[in-house]
Image (cartoon, rainbow, N blue to C red):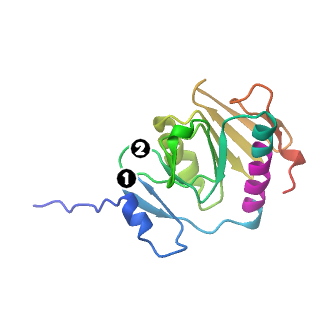
Amino acid sequence: MAIPQEKRFTAEDIYALPEGTRAELIDGQIYYMAPPSRRHQALVGELLATIRDYIRKEQGSCKVYPSPFAVFLNEDDLTYVEPDISVICDSNRLNDKGCSGAPDWILEIVSPASRRMDYFVKLFKYRSAGVQLYWIVDPEKEKITVWNFKGDDVTEFSFRDPVPVNLYEDFTIDFSALDI
């Protein structure tokens, strides 16, 4: 008896989706995404500005990109993600389509619809692709979970705690100061 073959999609299939369709591709499977909430977008905007302003002030070489920004984690075309915020410190990874390879730091703002993807599927993909720092910001629980894959540790913070950014020695983000 023949075993049915599961269709594997590629980045080309993502680009062929109708305009405005929000989707990611992980290991050849398409995952459609719901539109973000107002609070989600407020967090993205505040975090993006905080990170960008710090890098500019320090004259750093890293670049910060909000979603939708294409990240091709693997050399194949079977994984295409759009993290809420991507920080890339190696300009050789950047091209006209987005980032080819692992960003140094990824931030995802979790929502009820993305919880499983962010905490399990993407956690594994980001770690195995070489992301150094992965933050999951959970507005519902008002917590930040920080995975430092270089140091192989995980730490949780509340929205009242200053959260150290392990890419920079003197950079912390105070969530209580954000306008969300």
Residue 135, compared with residue 37, is above or below; it is above
Residue 55 is one of the magenta-drawn residues: no
Residue 125, compared with residue 166, is above or below; it is below
Q: Position of residue 149 (x, y in %)?
A: 57, 30
Asked whether 39 or 94 is in front, the reply is: 94
Mark 2 residue element: loop
The quadrant in which the N terminus is found is bottom left
Residue 108 can be seen, yes or no: no
Amino acid at dot 1: Leu
Asked whether 147 or 62 is in front, the reply is: 62
Amino acid at dot 2: Asn
What residue is pinned by disc 1? 78
Q: Position of residue 35 (x, y in %)?
A: 63, 69
The quadrant in which the C terminus is found is bottom right
Query: Are circles 1 and 2 on residues that touch, CB within 8 Å?
Result: yes
Q: Look at 61% across and 36% down and name the residue there.
A: 89
What residue is pinned by disc 2? 74
Q: Position of residue 55 (x, y in %)?
A: 75, 38
Quadrant of the rendered structure where residue 69 is? Answer: bottom right
Q: How many marks?
A: 2
